Structures are given as C-alpha cells and as structure tokens.
Image: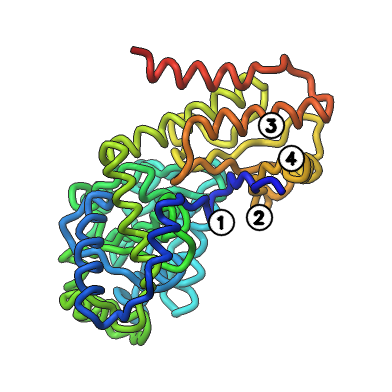
C-alpha cells in the first residue's frame, strides 16, 4: 500500500517528530507539568505571529476562533466591514450575520486581492464601523491579501479594530501583528502549523482587549476574557488539547532547526515560485497574479481539454497524488495545490513529475520534463553557491 501524497490546503502532512511528541503520555491540564508546557510553548509561538501579546489556545477548529473574535468585540446593532475575496472570507459574513450585526461587505472577484485603494474608497462613506474583518490568505483562490497595507488603511481612515483570519498561512507567511497594527490574529493547527485539526491559536492587542472588556454579547465556551484569565495561570478554562500542545512544542523545535522562522517563510516562497513556474512551463493557467499569489497554496486552472474531476481522480488512484478541487463556482474548474507546513522543494518536484505523468496518460500536448525542469531551475537559482 503506497502512502497518500497529500497536497491539500489542509489538513496537511504531520512530521514524524510532531507525531512522536503527540504520543507523549497523557497528563492532566491542571498540573504544574502542563503549566510549564503551556507557558513555554505559547512564548515560542509569539515570533510566528510577530507579537509580544499572549498567544491564547482554544481546543477547537479555526472557525470557532473566528467566531470568538466576532462575538467578543461586537455588541448588538454595531456595524462591521468584511473584506471577502473568496469562500472563506464569507465565513466572517455568515458569523456576523448570524449574531445580527450589520455587515458592509467589500467583495472582490475570486482570484483578485483587496487593494488598499479598494478599502479606502469603501471606508470613506462609513462612519460607525466597529471592526474590519479580512482574510490574510484565501484558501479557495490562492490569494494573499496585502494585510500590512490594509491594516494601515484601517488605522488611517477609521477607529475600527482590524481582525485577521490567518488560518491558512500563519506559520508559512510573514506576520507582524504588532508592527502592522492587527488587533486580533487567528490561525488553526491543521495547515502551515503542521498539526492535526483541533487547536486554534489567537493573539489580541491591548486596544482590542479594552473593547472586549466593555462588550455586551455573551459567550460561554468562547469567552476570551476567561481564556485570558486562565492563561495567566498557564492553563485554559476548559479541557485543553494536551496532545496537540505537545505537538506544537515540537513544531517550534522544527522551525528553530530550520534556522528560524525567516527560513521557514523563505521555503514557502520558494515552493510557491517552483509551482507557478512549473505550471507556466506546462501552459496550465493560474487563477491569481504573481503579485498576490499565496506562499501556501496555488489555485490552478484545469489543463485545457481535460475533464478536471476525472484527471484529479486519476492522479490519486494511479499515482497517490491528492489535490483539492475548487469551491463554489470554481468547482470543477480549478484544483488547489497545497504547499504549506511539512512540505519541501523535493515534494514539489515529486508532485510536478507526477502531474506530468498524469498529463501524458491523458495525451495532453507538452514536452515531457518541461515542468520539472522549470521548478528545478527556480530551486537551483535560489540555492546557487
């Protein structure tokens, strides 16, 4: 039985070191051993977020942390702006509408980023916006929004909080929460953080905490004030995802072993460039422009003349290469190549080679090896002595 070559945008492959760490004997979440683990691990995660604020850990999927960000800062009747450039940007819309908040939706075509000019023009006529929500990396389209510039726009043209969904890129893309002026930054465990699903990580600015302390929308399990109070004692208010936190500590080890987080970011940028160069060499279209392309996932149009679902099924059944399909109106039109977390240039070369094999099976017209060569050249140019 061959192993599945998982190149999805999440969940992603788990490093052996992380798996072994999660096999640690179970401990209680109300012991000094856990307190030490919690405090040391959350401290080590701070550079990944680019913050000096505390990292809070919620035993949940990333969506729960997004909901926590919404419900803890907004009171009934308040207005928000939600920037959406794809399926996951609409998560914030759905959450806000579920609670009855007034949503101003800044919507871009799937495949386009939200620029600072887009946001300036959208904010100008609005005067009562309490928060602006944005997706840093849109998993459905492979767009990386210019979050640093958008944060500056929010600070300049409003008094709103800036809340960012970083679920599919934190751990693989630059993040400077404090420097950029992000008020709440959220991620999940199962993507670039190289863990199984089940753990959310978020950090909150002092400005946001002041708003949360005055908020009138109630929540029990997602009460961030409770998480803050318990974090001061090195714990979570409810049962912690203990095994995942052991794994998170091992993730921090791996990042340090790679040479620090800047090297992890550089690896993701390299893999993005390898994938994009390979697809261009194979005359296969890319959904996004190079300027706003994600370092963790690439959205790729169906090769011309091929029925995409059949092609993807063939790749998985014959070559064990597993890609994600498109979402929404892009279903059946694009596939999504995940290259985040426990993924390396050699994995890109393997996947491109197998894509080429599949293309030959479908009599797609191209020069065999041209995609692999293009990706290899990007790698060699980056590592040339």
Q: Residue at x 57, y 28 (%)?
A: 349
Front residue (pair 284, 212): 284
Badge 2 is on which residue? 328
Q: Position of residue 25 (x, y in %)?
A: 38, 72
Label 2 element class: helix
CA–CA distance between discs 2 and 3? 24 Å
Q: Residues within 10 Å of mark 4 (few under 14, many from 20)?
A: many
Quadrant of the rendered image containing residue 22: bottom left
- Position of the C terminus by quadrant: top left
Residue at disc 4, secondary structure: helix
Q: Residue 64: image x %, image y %? A: 43, 72
Residue, disc 4:
315
Q: Nearer the viewer, mark 2 or mark 4?
A: 4
Does residue 298 appear to the left or right of 174 in the view shown? right
Of residues 287 and 273, the one drawn nearer to the viewer in this rendering: 273
Please state if 210 lies on the left or on the right of 63 as rendered.
Answer: left
Q: What numbered label is drawn on residue 87?
A: 1
Using the image, tell me which numbered label, if any, was put on residue 373: none
Q: Earlier in the sequence, mark 1 or mark 3?
A: 1
Does the residue at mark 4 contact the one at mark 1 (Cβ under 8 Å)?
no
Mark earlier in primary sequence (2, 1):
1
CB under 8 Å between callouts 4 and 3?
Answer: yes
Between the residue at mark 1 and the residue at mark 3, the CA separation in whole angstroms equals 26 Å
* Coordinates of residue 233 in the picture (x, y in percent): 17, 78
Q: Circle 3 sits on which residue? A: 355
Earlier residue among tags 4 and 1 = 1
Q: Is residue 160 visible?
A: no
Residues under numbered marks 2 and 1 in contact, where contact means CB atoms less than 8 Å apart: yes
Indicate whether 271 appears above or below 202: above
């Amino acid at each position: 039985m061959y192993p599945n070559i998982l190149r999805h945008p999440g969940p992603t492959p788990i490093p052996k070191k992380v798996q072994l760490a999660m096999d640690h004997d179970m401990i209680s979440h109300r012991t000094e051993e856990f307190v030490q683990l919690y405090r040391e691990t959350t401290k080590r995660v701070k550079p990944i977020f680019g913050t000096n604020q505390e990292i809070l850990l919620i035993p949940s999927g990333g969506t729960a942390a997004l909901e926590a960000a919404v419900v803890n800062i907004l009171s009934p009747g308040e207005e928000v702006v939600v920037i959406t450039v794809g399926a996951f940007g609409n998560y914030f819309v759905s959450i806000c509408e579920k609670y009855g908040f007034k949503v101003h939706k800044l919507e871009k075509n799937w495949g386009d980023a939200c620029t600072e000019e887009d946001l300036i023009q959208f904010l100008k006529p609005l005067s009562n916006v309490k928060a602006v929500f944005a997706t840093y990396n849109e998993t459905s389209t492979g767009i990386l929004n210019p979050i640093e510039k958008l944060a500056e726009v929010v600070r300049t043209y409003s008094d709103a909080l800036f809340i960012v969904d970083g679920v599919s890129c934190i751990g693989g893309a630059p993040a400077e929460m404090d420097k950029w002026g992000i008020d709440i930054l959220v991620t999940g465990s199962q993507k670039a953080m190289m863990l199984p699903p089940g753990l959310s990580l978020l950090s909150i600015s002092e400005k946001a905490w002041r708003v949360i302390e005055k908020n009138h929308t109630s929540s029990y399990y997602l009460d961030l004030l409770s998480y803050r109070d318990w974090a001061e004692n090195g714990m979570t208010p409810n049962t912690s995802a203990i095994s995942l936190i052991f794994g998170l500590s091992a993730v921090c080890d791996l990042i340090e072993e790679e040479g620090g987080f800047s090297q992890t970011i550089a690896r993701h940028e390299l893999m993005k460039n390898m994938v994009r160069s390979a697809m261009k060499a194979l005359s296969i279209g890319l959904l996004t422009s190079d300027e706003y392309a994600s370092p963790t996932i690439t959205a790729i149009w169906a090769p011309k003349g091929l029925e995409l679902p059949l092609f993807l099924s063939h790749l998985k059944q014959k070559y064990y290469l597993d890609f994600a399909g498109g979402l929404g109106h892009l279903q059946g039109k694009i596939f999504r190549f995940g290259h985040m977390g426990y993924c390396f240039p050699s994995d890109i070369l393997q996947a491109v080679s197998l894509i080429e094999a599949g293309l030959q099976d479908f009599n797609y017209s191209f020069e065999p090896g041209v995609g692999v060569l293009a990706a290899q050249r990007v790698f060699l140019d980056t590592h040339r002595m």
